[in-house]
Image: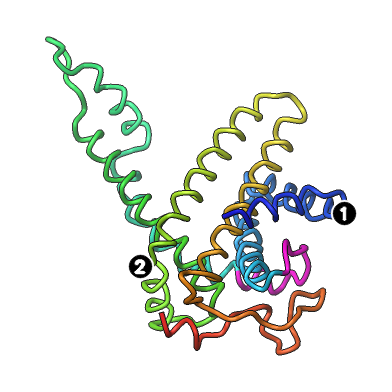
Amino acid sequence: MFDALVDLRELLDRDRTDTLVVGTILSIATVSAPVVGVLLLGYAVRAIRYRVRGDGVPAFDGWRSLFGDGLRVAVTTGPLHVPAVAITIVVGYDRMLRGASSLTYIGHYAFSPDYGAVAALVAVAFLELAGGFLSVATLVALASSDTMGRHLLTDVVAVARRRRFHRVFGLVLGVGVAARFARLALGVIPFVGEPLGAAVSFVALVVAVSALADVVNRDGGDPLSSPLSDTPADGVDAAGTDGRLSEEHLSEV
């Protein structure tokens, strides 16, 4: 867990200003162009691989590789959120919000809560929590191995069953929620609020993926993967694996 603080200090170092600035710009861009988030997903994959090897915080380079890794994450995790989105569309987002506030009518002689909307809201919250849990496990699995298809499912299950991952997911969830509220709070500040909020979001991403790398790298002396050789500046190591981790150790979990 403390490796995340090391990465945070490295990111905030003046020599890494370019990484922080690019990450902030991409975070801002996701508001109007969500597809840009694919690059941040790819960066998360690369950051996990770098931390496992002890290389610290990666720079933004090798954009084609970043996009490819991010697209793999998006394609494999997107379906996990379809059920929650479907319920929201059918019931209606506004109705669900009103349903939560309608609980104040419990016991009222003339009005009653919208229990259907409340049930939909609870279902969406549960489905999104489960989807988020599996999405993060998928991110870790893809960072450990580029295997897709049925082998990826096996890898995801292996990650999701690890107790260390359960603890780290709680941390990641807390960091994400805190960053979201911080971004909303900073957003009300004229001119600088949005960039500051985006910077906080990117910093939270680096902290979260650094903690997730700890799941890959160490778990009771039974690592999911082994360190690779040094990686050139383009983000692709001498073997051309872009920091991908050995599947041999992953299969031993």
Q: Residue at image x 50%, y 77%?
A: 224
Q: Looking at this rendering, what residue extends furthest in the right direction?
A: 15
Answer whether residue 62 is magenta in the image.
yes
Q: Quadrant of the N terminus?
A: bottom right
Q: Residue at image x 27%, y 40%?
A: 122
Q: Looking at this rendering, what residue extends furthest in the front direction?
A: 221
The location of residue 208, given as percent across then percent down, is 57, 53
Q: How is the image coloured?
A: rainbow
Q: Between residue 148 and residue 95, name the one nearer to us.
A: 148
Can you say whether 16 is above or below 185 in the image? below
Q: What numbered label is drawn on residue 15?
A: 1
Q: What numbered label is drawn on residue 161?
A: 2
The location of residue 232, given as percent across then percent down, is 80, 78
Q: Amino acid at mark 2?
A: Arg
Q: Which residues are drawn in magenta? A: 55-69
Where residue 55 sits, quadrant-wise, is bottom right
Q: In terms of sequence position, does the residue under pointer 2 or pointer 1 come before the other?
A: 1
